[in-house]
Amino acid sequence: MFLIAFLGIALTFGAVRPAKPTATAPGSNLRLGAAPLQPNSLCATSERIIFSCLSRRAGSKLTKIVSLCGSPDLTRERGYLQYRYGVPAKIELEYPNSRAGTQQMFKYTHYMRYRVDLTEINFELDGYQYQIFDDYNGEEKRDISTQGVLVTEPGQGKEFTFLCRSKVKADFSLLDEVLDRER
Protein backbone atom coordinates (compact mmCIF):
# COMPACT_ATOMS: atom_id res chain seq x y z
CA MET A 1 0.00 0.00 0.00
CA PHE A 2 1.37 3.41 -0.94
CA LEU A 3 1.22 5.95 1.90
CA ILE A 4 2.38 9.57 2.04
CA ALA A 5 2.14 11.47 5.33
CA PHE A 6 2.64 15.21 5.58
CA LEU A 7 1.21 18.20 7.40
CA GLY A 8 -0.69 15.75 9.56
CA ILE A 9 -2.54 14.29 6.56
CA ALA A 10 -2.01 10.86 5.07
CA LEU A 11 -2.79 10.14 1.44
CA THR A 12 -3.50 6.57 0.43
CA PHE A 13 -4.12 6.18 -3.30
CA GLY A 14 -5.45 9.76 -3.39
CA ALA A 15 -7.88 9.36 -0.47
CA VAL A 16 -7.37 11.84 2.34
CA ARG A 17 -7.64 10.62 5.90
CA PRO A 18 -6.32 11.96 9.20
CA ALA A 19 -2.83 10.83 10.06
CA LYS A 20 -1.96 9.39 13.43
CA PRO A 21 -1.68 12.33 15.86
CA THR A 22 1.73 13.24 17.22
CA ALA A 23 2.05 13.16 20.99
CA THR A 24 2.04 16.49 22.74
CA ALA A 25 5.02 17.47 24.83
CA PRO A 26 4.81 16.81 28.56
CA GLY A 27 3.28 19.78 30.31
CA SER A 28 1.38 20.89 27.22
CA ASN A 29 -2.39 21.15 27.68
CA LEU A 30 -3.31 22.12 24.14
CA ARG A 31 -4.84 18.75 23.29
CA LEU A 32 -6.82 18.64 26.47
CA GLY A 33 -8.44 21.96 25.68
CA ALA A 34 -7.18 23.49 28.94
CA ALA A 35 -5.19 26.26 27.24
CA PRO A 36 -7.39 28.80 25.44
CA LEU A 37 -6.24 29.45 21.87
CA GLN A 38 -5.95 32.73 20.02
CA PRO A 39 -8.56 33.24 17.26
CA ASN A 40 -7.76 31.47 13.94
CA SER A 41 -4.63 30.01 15.49
CA LEU A 42 -3.32 26.93 17.26
CA CYS A 43 -1.21 29.13 19.56
CA ALA A 44 -2.30 29.45 23.17
CA THR A 45 -3.18 32.93 24.43
CA SER A 46 0.05 32.82 26.46
CA GLU A 47 2.19 32.21 23.33
CA ARG A 48 3.50 34.44 20.54
CA ILE A 49 2.14 33.92 17.06
CA ILE A 50 5.09 33.81 14.70
CA PHE A 51 2.89 32.69 11.78
CA SER A 52 -0.72 31.53 11.57
CA CYS A 53 -3.46 31.21 8.95
CA LEU A 54 -6.33 29.08 7.74
CA SER A 55 -5.04 26.90 4.91
CA ARG A 56 -6.33 24.49 2.33
CA ARG A 57 -4.66 22.25 -0.20
CA ALA A 58 -5.64 22.92 -3.82
CA GLY A 59 -8.71 20.90 -4.73
CA SER A 60 -9.60 20.18 -1.12
CA LYS A 61 -12.57 21.56 0.79
CA LEU A 62 -10.98 20.88 4.18
CA THR A 63 -9.70 23.98 5.94
CA LYS A 64 -7.03 23.53 8.58
CA ILE A 65 -4.94 25.92 10.64
CA VAL A 66 -1.18 26.25 10.21
CA SER A 67 0.59 27.91 13.15
CA LEU A 68 4.15 28.51 14.26
CA CYS A 69 4.00 29.39 17.94
CA GLY A 70 6.67 30.67 20.29
CA SER A 71 6.95 31.00 24.02
CA PRO A 72 6.75 34.53 25.44
CA ASP A 73 10.38 34.28 26.63
CA LEU A 74 11.73 33.15 23.23
CA THR A 75 15.44 33.85 22.69
CA ARG A 76 18.28 31.87 21.13
CA GLU A 77 18.92 30.17 24.49
CA ARG A 78 15.45 30.10 26.12
CA GLY A 79 11.90 29.30 25.24
CA TYR A 80 10.57 27.21 22.37
CA LEU A 81 9.10 27.24 18.86
CA GLN A 82 6.47 24.73 17.73
CA TYR A 83 4.78 24.14 14.40
CA ARG A 84 1.16 23.00 14.69
CA TYR A 85 -1.31 21.84 12.08
CA GLY A 86 -4.98 20.86 12.42
CA VAL A 87 -8.02 22.36 14.09
CA PRO A 88 -8.44 23.46 17.71
CA ALA A 89 -10.25 20.26 18.68
CA LYS A 90 -7.60 18.09 17.02
CA ILE A 91 -4.00 19.16 16.48
CA GLU A 92 -2.84 16.59 13.92
CA LEU A 93 0.83 17.53 13.85
CA GLU A 94 2.95 19.28 16.46
CA TYR A 95 6.67 19.61 15.79
CA PRO A 96 8.87 19.19 17.68
CA ASN A 97 7.29 17.08 20.42
CA SER A 98 9.70 18.37 23.04
CA ARG A 99 10.03 22.04 23.87
CA ALA A 100 13.77 21.81 24.64
CA GLY A 101 16.29 23.14 22.10
CA THR A 102 13.68 23.78 19.43
CA GLN A 103 15.52 26.81 18.06
CA GLN A 104 18.12 24.48 16.49
CA MET A 105 15.41 22.51 14.65
CA PHE A 106 14.27 25.41 12.45
CA LYS A 107 16.17 27.46 9.83
CA TYR A 108 15.24 30.95 8.74
CA THR A 109 15.72 32.84 5.48
CA HIS A 110 14.72 36.42 4.79
CA TYR A 111 15.43 38.32 1.58
CA MET A 112 14.26 41.86 1.04
CA ARG A 113 14.80 44.56 -1.57
CA TYR A 114 12.63 47.28 -2.99
CA ARG A 115 9.16 45.79 -3.70
CA VAL A 116 10.25 42.22 -2.83
CA ASP A 117 10.06 40.53 0.58
CA LEU A 118 10.60 36.75 0.91
CA THR A 119 10.52 34.93 4.25
CA GLU A 120 10.99 31.19 4.82
CA ILE A 121 11.12 29.03 7.93
CA ASN A 122 12.27 25.48 7.22
CA PHE A 123 12.39 22.21 9.11
CA GLU A 124 12.55 18.50 8.39
CA LEU A 125 10.38 15.73 9.82
CA ASP A 126 10.69 12.05 8.82
CA GLY A 127 12.50 13.02 5.60
CA TYR A 128 9.80 15.51 4.55
CA GLN A 129 10.95 19.09 4.06
CA TYR A 130 8.55 21.74 5.39
CA GLN A 131 8.77 25.36 4.31
CA ILE A 132 6.56 28.01 5.89
CA PHE A 133 6.63 30.92 3.46
CA ASP A 134 5.45 34.51 3.29
CA ASP A 135 6.28 36.03 -0.11
CA TYR A 136 5.55 39.44 -1.57
CA ASN A 137 6.55 40.50 -5.09
CA GLY A 138 5.56 44.03 -6.10
CA GLU A 139 7.60 43.97 -9.30
CA GLU A 140 4.88 42.18 -11.27
CA LYS A 141 2.09 44.03 -13.11
CA ARG A 142 -0.15 42.98 -10.24
CA ASP A 143 1.43 42.68 -6.81
CA ILE A 144 1.68 39.03 -5.77
CA SER A 145 1.45 38.01 -2.13
CA THR A 146 1.40 34.32 -1.16
CA GLN A 147 1.67 32.60 2.19
CA GLY A 148 1.44 29.01 3.29
CA VAL A 149 3.38 25.80 3.72
CA LEU A 150 5.24 23.84 1.06
CA VAL A 151 5.89 20.17 1.86
CA THR A 152 8.42 18.24 -0.19
CA GLU A 153 8.27 14.44 -0.20
CA PRO A 154 11.57 12.61 0.31
CA GLY A 155 13.16 10.87 -2.64
CA GLN A 156 11.10 11.97 -5.62
CA GLY A 157 10.78 15.57 -4.46
CA LYS A 158 7.05 15.80 -5.13
CA GLU A 159 5.71 19.05 -3.64
CA PHE A 160 2.41 19.79 -1.93
CA THR A 161 1.41 23.41 -1.30
CA PHE A 162 -1.06 24.50 1.34
CA LEU A 163 -1.94 28.15 0.66
CA CYS A 164 -3.33 30.46 3.28
CA ARG A 165 -7.01 31.18 2.69
CA SER A 166 -7.31 33.88 5.32
CA LYS A 167 -5.44 36.96 6.43
CA VAL A 168 -2.09 35.83 7.84
CA LYS A 169 -0.99 36.69 11.34
CA ALA A 170 2.79 36.95 11.23
CA ASP A 171 5.55 38.46 13.34
CA PHE A 172 9.01 37.43 12.17
CA SER A 173 10.79 40.24 14.07
CA LEU A 174 12.53 37.93 16.57
CA LEU A 175 13.68 35.28 14.16
CA ASP A 176 16.95 36.97 13.15
CA GLU A 177 18.06 36.81 16.77
CA VAL A 178 16.57 33.38 17.58
CA LEU A 179 17.17 31.08 14.58
CA ASP A 180 20.17 30.21 12.45
CA ARG A 181 20.05 31.67 8.97
CA GLU A 182 19.83 29.27 6.07
CA ARG A 183 21.98 30.11 3.09
Image (cartoon, rainbow, N blue to C red):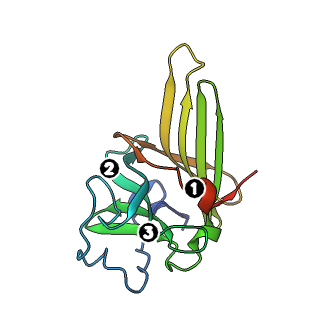
On the image, numbered disc 2 is attached to which residue?
63
The residue drawn where x is 39% and y is 43% is 168
What residue is shown with label 3? 71
Residue 34, placed above or below residue 178: below
Q: Residues within 10 Å of mark 1 (few under 14, many from 20)?
A: many
Mark found first going from the N terminus, 1 or 3: 3
Asked if marks 1 and 3 touch (Cβ < 8 Å), the reply is: no
Discs 2/3, front: 3
Residue under label 1, please give it. 175
Under mark 3, the amino acid is Ser
Q: Residue at x 23, y 68 (%)?
A: 36
Examine the rendered structure and indicate whether residue 118 appears above or below residue 127.
Answer: above
| Residue 83, image x, y percentages | 47, 63
Q: Amino acid at mark 1?
A: Leu
Question: In which quadrant of the rendered view does residue 181 lie?
Answer: bottom right
Residues packed near mark 3 inside 10 Å, few (<14), some (14 to 19) or many (20 plus) = some
Q: Find the distance from the CA under tag 2 to the CA under tag 3.
A: 26 Å
Q: Is residue 58 shown left or right of residue 159?
A: left
Q: Gap between marks 2 and 1, in whole Å? A: 27 Å
Q: Residue furthest top?
A: 141
